[in-house]
Image (cartoon, rainbow, N blue to C red):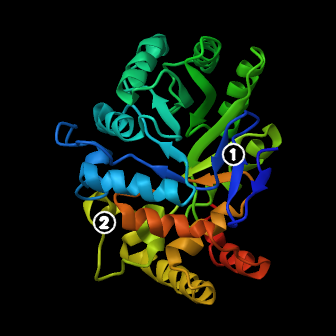
């Protein structure tokens, strides 16, 4: 099933991605803000959501630090910076043993029929002959799920992708994708959705349950709730970029955030770990869940990777789950 792991001697583990032959680290790296973003649209989240982007060398250092810590999964998308993130990931991973995931489509206006050409463009930007995990970025009324999955299956059979995933799919949409792929003898590897201690919707909207039923890995984006779970922000210290306008950082939600971060600090103190590392560890210990926090530099990559080096006990996991129960909207 999706949560089967193979432990090594350093308390790290490899996660089987769905029911595929891909083995990935229990933690990944989100590369949305990697690359040269100056040419990206001003409204692009990759350019504006997390403040100023880092340099190519800082991103290289983030990759090197991640690999050294056993983190081998890197997630990007054609849409991030109009291909800028894919180009940077391609530059940095040439000749490296990295499991690379990216997404179709390159724009919200795309149609299903453009998938083969978009895949070729992603392959070129990534400088790869095959993409490890190719995902549909979001459901669209303009792109029928069976059509998309058949095109994905064609690409698998052509050797251009190893595994098929989706992103932001509901439980019903995931079942439809899984069924369409099954008719071609191909498993659905993953569904990438927002999931964190402060956003536990996958537990109540059926997505996590269906992932486990079907043997699909849940890839958790925004696992630190846009930085809210790092403990760095408060009523007087706001994050950079668009994040400052998110609900986590608004007045009425700050008491809840303060309470959760206080608990993260208390639990972290017993393990000599930070709030963000405890928050990531809580996700890692959920069956079949793969968190992909962003990392703009080596320091952030090291902070994230340290979540692989300790284990929360059952009372600690339960305390965090109970403290954020209201986030299960």
User: Closest to the observer: 127 or 167?
Assistant: 127
User: Closest to the observer: 309 or 246?
Assistant: 309
Numbered mark located on residue 268 in the image: none
Crowdedness near tag 2: few (<14), some (14–19) or many (≥20) residues, C-alpha within 10 Å: some
Q: Is residue 311 visible?
A: yes
Q: Which residue is tagged 1?
A: 207
Q: Is residue 47 left or right of residue 135?
A: left
Instruction: Tell me the quadrant of the picture where the C terminus can be found.
Output: bottom right
The percent position of residue 104, horizontal first and vertical second, equals 46, 27
SS for callout 2: helix
Q: Is residue 137 visible?
A: no
* Count of numbered circles on the image: 2
Reading the chain from its start, which is encountered first: label 1 or label 2? 1
Crowdedness near tag 1: few (<14), some (14–19) or many (≥20) residues, C-alpha within 10 Å: many
Instruction: Tell me the quadrant of the picture where the N terminus can be found.
Output: top right
Q: Residue at x 70, y 57 (%)?
A: 13
The percent position of residue 284, horizontal first and vertical second, equals 66, 61
SS for callout 1: helix
Q: Is residue 236 left or right of residue 39?
A: right
Q: Residue at x 45, y 49 (%)?
A: 30
Asked where in the image residue 108 lies, by quadrant, the reply is top left
Q: Residue at x 37, y 62 (%)?
A: 298
User: Closest to the observer: 196 or 60?
Assistant: 60
Q: Residue at x 29, y 38 (%)?
A: 81
The percent position of residue 203, horizontal first and vertical second, equals 70, 56
Q: Which residue is tagged 2?
A: 244
- 313 vs 123: above or below: below
- 212 vs 66: above or below: above
Q: Is residue 73 left or right of residue 81?
A: right
Q: CA distance from mark 1 to mark 2?
A: 28 Å
């Amino acid at each position: 099933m999706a949560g089967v792991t193979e432990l090594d001697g350093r308390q790290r583990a490899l996660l089987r991605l769905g029911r595929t032959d891909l083995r990935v680290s229990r933690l990944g790296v989100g590369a949305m803000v990697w690359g040269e973003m100056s040419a990206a649209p001003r409204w692009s989240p990759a350019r504006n959501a997390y403040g100023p982007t880092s340099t190519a060398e800082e991103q290289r250092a983030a990759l090197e630090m991640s690999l050294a810590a056993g983190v081998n999964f890197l997630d990007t998308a054609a849409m991030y910076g109009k291909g800028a993130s894919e180009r940077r990931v391609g530059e940095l991973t040439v000749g490296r043993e990295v499991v690379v995931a990216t997404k179709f489509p390159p724009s919200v206006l795309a149609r299903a029929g453009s998938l083969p050409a978009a895949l070729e463009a992603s392959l070129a930007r990534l400088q790869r002959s095959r993409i490890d995990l190719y995902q549909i970025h979001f459901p669209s009324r303009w792109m029928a799920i069976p059509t998309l999955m058949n095109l994905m299956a064609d690409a698998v059979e052509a050797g251009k992708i190893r595994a098929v995933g989706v992103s932001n799919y509901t439980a019903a949409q995931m079942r439809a994708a899984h069924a369409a792929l099954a008719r071609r003898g191909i498993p659905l590897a993953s569904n990438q959705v927002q999931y964190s201690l402060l956003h536990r919707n996958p537990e109540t909207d059926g997505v996590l349950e269906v992932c486990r039923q079907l043997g699909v890995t849940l890839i958790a984006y925004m696992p630190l709730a846009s930085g809210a779970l790092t403990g760095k922000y408060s009523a007087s210290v706001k994050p950079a970029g668009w994040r400052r306008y998110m609900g986590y950082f608004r007045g009425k939600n700050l008491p809840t955030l303060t309470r959760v971060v206080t608990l993260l600090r208390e639990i972290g103190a017993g393990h000599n770990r930070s709030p963000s590392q405890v928050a990531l560890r809580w996700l890692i210990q959920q069956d079949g869940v793969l968190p992909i926090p962003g990392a703009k530099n080596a320091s952030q990559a090291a902070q994230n990777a340290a979540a692989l080096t300790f284990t929360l006990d059952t009372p600690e996991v339960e305390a965090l789950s109970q403290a954020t129960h209201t986030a299960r909207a």
